Image (spheres, grey):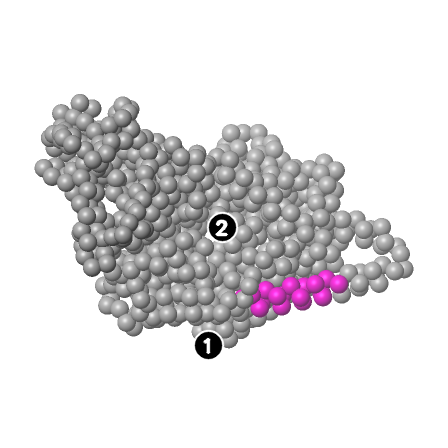
Amino acid sequence: MAIRANSAAGEGWLPLLAWALFCLVAGSVFIGYVAVSLAAGGGVVVLPLDDVYIHFQYARQLASGQPYVYNPGQPPTSGATSFLYPFVLAAGYLLGFQGLNLGLWALIVGALALLASLQTLYLLCRALAVPVWLSVLCPVLFAGTGVVAWHYLSGMETGLMSLAALLTLLMVVQQRPRGFVLAAAALALLRPEGGIMAVLACGAMLLTLRPATWRQRLFLLLPLAALALQPLVNWLITGTFIAAGNQSKSILGMVPFIPEVVIDRIGTNWARTWRDFFTGQDAEYGSFLPLLNAPLALVGLLLALRRPAWRTMGLLLILWALAVTAAVATLDTAFWHFRRYQLPIMALFFPLLMLPLAAGWRVVATSRRRYSLSLVLLVGAGIVLAASSRQFLAYYTLNVHYVVAQPLSMARWLAAHTPPAAVVAVHDAGMMRYMGGRTTLDIVGLTTPGAADYWRNGPGSVAEFLMRRQPDYIASYGDGHGYGLALIADTSLYGEPLAGFPVALAAGSNVALAAPFQGIYQPDYAPQARRETALQTSIQPYLDGFRMVAAVNVADVASEREYAYRWQNSRAPQGFPTDVYEIAYVNCAADCRLRDGGRRINHEEAFTVPVTPGQAVILVTRVNAMHRVEYNVYADEQFVGTRFVPQERGRWLEIPTLIPAALVTDSTLTLRIRVNSPDGDYMPYYHLLYQGDYAVPAPPAAPLVQFQDGALLLADLVQRLEGRTLQLDVTWFTGQGARGDYAIFVHAYAGDGSQ
């Protein structure tokens, strides 16, 4: 690929005019978006994504000498997925762009990245022998495409990432090793998928230049060192190689992990990505790429592959596109924020689509109608770009409004109405920490170590996380949020809102993570106080003389780890993998309304507890009797018995299981529960283990009725009539041989014998 010569040589003042035009275009985009931000933000610069302010908080801490620390005084966390971008923002903070004004610095950085991208696109087109006027048109088309301008001026690292991808490609095309190393290193440091692109680009550069010495080869591989830098720093500072964002967003961390479901989700995301590229349409918000952008880019790619000088570039673009879209498809958030993860690939379409246009221009270059055809092209492009720009400026306005109406307003309320030492649990961790000035507990896990594990497990585990950490306030979504937070809001863990923040959402335009309602709540922790106690009246006689030895809190990730808890599903559960309820017992001596989080299981669970050898164990399992299910209990793989859960919707049920002393032979006991029912979910919430000396009670001498060949005895029946109320006290006895699920029918007769 011998294209190192300056393709602009001999063009005189044309490159300078092109540069001036690009400055004008980038400046106009900057001014337009700043004006929209100020107008929708009420006179201050507000950006359209709460995620921006996560970067801002890390940047502020970095500027104050506390890198990777999100909440002052707390351990560091790797919530900033981009390694390089917080340093860029911290420079602006040190220059005086503080508070919401850091948003202006982010917009300046985005506008400069856009300007550099326009110049890079121009040079790429010239290096690919595209005529000057089309080489100028390409950057203008790029900047005028609404989704491009949106992302460069969103405040995120997306614009810098796209610039690094374009620069890396230019360096490969122009065969400039030094520039390549810098551009590819920046690419690797800006985002994780940039690391994939850097690795592939190193291979292309080695193939293109064919360096003769090891020193030259090692020089071209320097970007790989940059690739290793972020996970190494993450490990040294936080103890984990993986950024918290990847932990909380990856489909590969789906709970429960069912391989065929995971593969289907990733495959569906990947197929949707390419389908939408070629149509330029998104099902939710409409057009995001000009018509025929991707199809023309594909034609351009085929033209590039036909020319030996451009073949390496074409192969690199294919590998980049396939690898990056596949990596992004593994994210739950693959299509969030108007596809910000996919913009670097979309940016690569633009120089390619110029190749078929250039070929067409050469065909008509001698035609009398060439100027008419070019005018038609320019006018058509202008109309499309105007519509696209207007569309995304409107989206920008709406999302700035959403940020002002909810996270910014909530942050200001927290700053004004809560004590400085308050800890606030939040779902959107950016603005409420950055402008609220309160320590935040991030329930998604981006900025709070360990929280991502709970988030991946569903709303029941999130509730357990909140009950374990007990923040002073909760500022979050409730009803209407797609991740099950309404289940938590329906309990007293949220309580009545101290302040509410409603907003009217426009369908298909919300990327700021707004919801029709968010609130600030003061949690009530009383309904969880007695969770480590068996409360059901009917089982209390069994526990006399026994002591508690372990309490396995199902759905609480920390408790599950303590007892080596593991579980499996053979199919997707009928709801979230965990849920939370605040309900009463089937029977209880007092007001035993309890709040607890638990799992939905349809295959099996197991856990290991410390015990005293030679003593009997009573396992008390608290279940939500949502479904009628049957399960077997095993102790150290020895069958103990079959248990039955009757359907008692909206009730806690505690089921005791006796493990005889003969089966308790070691200092630990592994209990396994295998679900037998093909329909419905077994829903455990707590396993309470008691130990003591168990004496087998003698059967009643004269039972009233016998069932199952004496396995189930009706020992006593006492009737009490109080006014018009008949109370029956029924005493049953079984020596563990009874099987089945029973219903009792009572027929009441009047004194004359009629029913």
Q: Residue most toward the front?
A: 752
Residue ID for mark 2: 333
Give the left or right position of residue 544, taking residue 95 as reference: left
Q: Callout 1: helix, strand or loop?
A: loop
**Residue drawn at (66%, 40%), measured in percent from left and top?**
314
Q: Callout 2: helix, strand or loop?
A: loop
Task: Answer few, some or many: residues within 10 Å of disc 2's Cα (few below 14, many 20 plus, some between 14 and 19).
Answer: some
Residue 261 lies in the magenta-colored region: no
Residue closer to the observer: 248 or 494: 494
Q: Where is the N terminus found, in terms of image quarters? A: top right
Residue closer to the observer: 39 or 662: 662
Q: How many marks?
A: 2
Give the left or right position of residue 5, taking residue 432 as reference: right
Span colored in magenta: 380-396
Residue 384 lies in the magenta-colored region: yes
**Amino acid tagged 1:** Gly
How far apart marks 1 and 2 lie (CA) works out to: 31 Å
**Residue drawn at (54%, 39%), measured in percent from left and top?**
264
Residue ID for mark 1: 43
Residue closer to the observer: 705 or 742: 705
Position above or below: 587 against 691: below
| Tag 1 near tag 2, CB within 8 Å | no
